[in-house]
Image: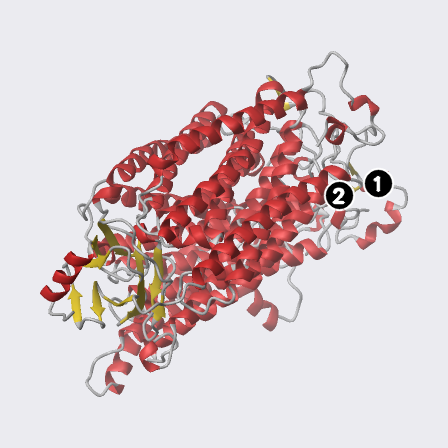
Amino acid sequence: MSEANIEGNAGSASAAPAPAEPRHLRRVLIIWAVLSVVVIAIWLAVAQFILPQAASSLDVADNFTFLILTVLAVPVSLFVFVFLGYSLIVFRVKERPTEDGPPLQPRPSLQIGWLGITSLLCLFLLIWGLFAFYQETSAAATTNTLVVQVTAQQWQWTFDYPQYGATSQGAQVIEMPVNRPVEFYVTSKDVLHGFSIRALGVRVDANPGETTTTTIITPTQIGSYTVQCVELCGLYHSYMWEAVNVVSADTFNSWITSQGGHL
Amino acid sequence: MSSTTDSTTVAPVRRPNLINNLFPSVVSGIVFGVVAAAVAGVLVNRLTTALSPDGVPNDDAVISAVYTAWVLFFFIGIGAFNGVIKWAFSRREPTYAEELQLAGKDQGLWRYFRYTTDHKVVGMQYLATVFVLFFLGSMGAFSIRLEQSTPGAIYFNPSTYNTIVGMHGILMIASTIIMVSGPFGNFILPIMIGARDMAFPRLNALSYWLLFTAIPIFLSVLLLGGFQTGWTGYAPLADQGLTPGMDAYCFTILVFAISTTIAAVNILTTVIVMRTRGMTWGRLPIFVWGVLLSVILSLTAFPSFIVSQTMVLMDRIFQTSFFLAASGGNNWLYEHLFWFMGHPEVYVIALPAMAVAAEVAAVFTRKPLFGYRLLVGGLVGISVLSVIVWGHHLYTSGSENALTGPFMLDTELISIPTGIFFLVLVGTFWRGQVWVTVPLLFVCGVLVNFVVGGVSGIFLADLPTDEILHGGMFVVAHFHFTLVGAGVFGFFAGIYYWFPKMVGKRLDPALGRLHFWLFEIGFVGTFSALFYAGLQGEPRWSANIAPPFATANTIASLFAIVIAASVFTFIYNVIYSLARGEVATADEWGAKTLEWTVPTPVPLENFEQLPVVTSLPYNYGSPLPESPVAPAADIAGAAIEAPIQPQGEA
């Protein structure tokens, strides 16, 4: 985009700026570029404190996508903020204006360029999203994969471990071994619920009468996380959260035994 | 439309007295409606008790009968059918005086409480209703912020909280759908296109009074134990027979959707057939385009809302099982029907507000829109694309995900026409005579907030980030940035801009600036905090905030106090300006659209002589110092063609 693109208007030479007038467009573009770099740098520096802890490779990838999209969003947003702010400060008139502004119209090249840039951004988002999507869905179950059957009902979760014959229900803590792939089979007994463990990047609806298989994820960090319901399911929806502990294999084995399972 | 305005031939309208004022009016409508509702309730109660094997009445059927009787007999009581019945049984055409009385001439304040067909009266009725609904809805919002200010359900029990969230949602969605198309679409739009009234004045009154009848139905939710589903009304939760408040919700939606559909048909027809001479599609003010595209969109969207709520009511009353998995139904059906309405509806709200912003920006920068045709194309693009993006609400629904890719594509494509809006607006400000009035401040608010709302939508459109944000507070913050940040700020730009034309008084600019800054600071503060909470994983609809999200929610609640202050500033401003405001001039801002060419207050049927339009209303700084409007007599040949106009001149 150049000065000529915005200022040009066929048949109105009077709209051209006097030579002494500051070169607004150049100025505002410099402000925009500098601010974009500064804000992106600040965001990259503070992002680790703002983004929540990720405890699986999937969630790490999701957080990274968030980071990248934000880096893209900064110059896009600042473009509007800076142009608007500059216009409000520099072109402001105190009183009711007695004369009109110049009748600027966008050149075709500006219009097509603008559409082109926004289309490219769009294309990038699409490719990024599709790539992540197919990468996720292509993970295949191995013999080592832990199967957890998740049953939602108003207003509690039930976790079955069919490979071990164990069940964990209600307010008890749910445990999972670290560094072992997990696949959740999610269903509901009554209404729609939403099964979500933010730190593991798992989020899928629990539908009555259907069993949904989630992406296979591998918890990579020992720690205590939360499973919560993210679809309004009635009265005690907001009480439907419990602790999920990712623990070492040994701890998991003794926990499974204590839940009535067999190894 | 009347055929003459020659005042000497008009018979005097009868003098109103109290009885004439009350019958028919909204008072007699309410009396008829309440009596009929009581009778219907008792009858159906007896009937269902007698038919039931165990002698228990069907509560859902009783409630449905009560609401149906209320709506029908309200309209009989308010005299909606009087004109039609008189016309059908009379041996003569209605006189001009009778037509005028129906339009509300010479009925003073009472015309606002009648089945009045004048588009300006309907516009003012909508405006007052929008204010009331907004106020009720914002009380809901403050209750939500109060409850979420600390962990645990402290101020309300979870049932009350869910009801408040649902009522806040419906009140705000309903009032934002009508906030621009209702008051300005009825009052301003016909004048803007050079029409004397809407195409169907009686349907206009019908659409408003249907909205009115929906309000008591909706408030009866409180008497019927509330509803647990939130504004989305997801089945099968909605099918659970917990409280009859759910029936009230479904009925409200039915009546509201019918009202909106009628209004949409009316506005669409008006713009197609009532434009004055020279008002070609290419000269239509951008505001008219915005409202037009919005109502077309609502015509495609709302039928599916009517269908889904009818199905829920049938599940509840007649024990059908559209959404019950145990009997062969499916909850995904509801989700698809709902979002097929729900996503276009967002643009039903946003398009007119965006158009207001563009309209106001051109006036206060004294510049033509930077690419009028480009913007029209952008708005058309948004409305077309918005019909095919609803699937992004089902990314994590667990249903077959083959369509995730296409829906991701559609959703992200919308950012291209939306980007056009920003190019045009920013370009309009560029090098203009930027006169920073209160309406223009709100336009700046629209731009700033809508950028944030738009780019945060990208995170929800892209699957990898949606799967950590879906169903959470991030979504809440995102759609508040679009619906409040763009929608409501656009409405306020419109109200500060057109209030002098509609009411004849200026809104106080100092109070207006205070209102803007309180609103903007409070709004950005509140929802930025909620963006953060959502990113950490806080779910929506929570009465009981989990401790990790407590700080962000407390901050959000503190900023909500600033929003509350802005609301009361605005209310004070309206009351103060109505009482003591300066009297506005006919052309308050030096704008060039037609509504500023007519006197204030706008006379019945708006124009002495229908104008002839010769250019876009944005020819600021044009090398040809030509007025966009020429009186008919100034145009060669106009006198010959004059009889074609509905209102010929002598």
Is residue B243 rendered to the left or right of residue B80? Answer: left
In the rendered view, would you say B157 is above or below B488? below
- Which circle's residue, 2 or 1, is located before the other in the chain? 2
Residue B170: assigned label: none
| Front-most of residues A8 and A95 | A8
Q: Mark 1 = which residue?
A: B633
| Mark 2 belongs to chain | B
Residue B447, x across and y down, in percent: 54, 36
Residue at the (30%, 78%) spot, across then down: B44
Residue A123, x across and y down, in percent: 60, 50
The residue tagged with tag 2: helix, strand or loop?
loop
Residue at the (86%, 41%) spot, across then down: B635
Residue at the (43%, 56%) spot, across then down: B212
Q: Quadrant of residue A26?
A: top right
In the rendered view, would you say B609 is above or below A245? above
Residue B215, x across and y down, in percent: 39, 56
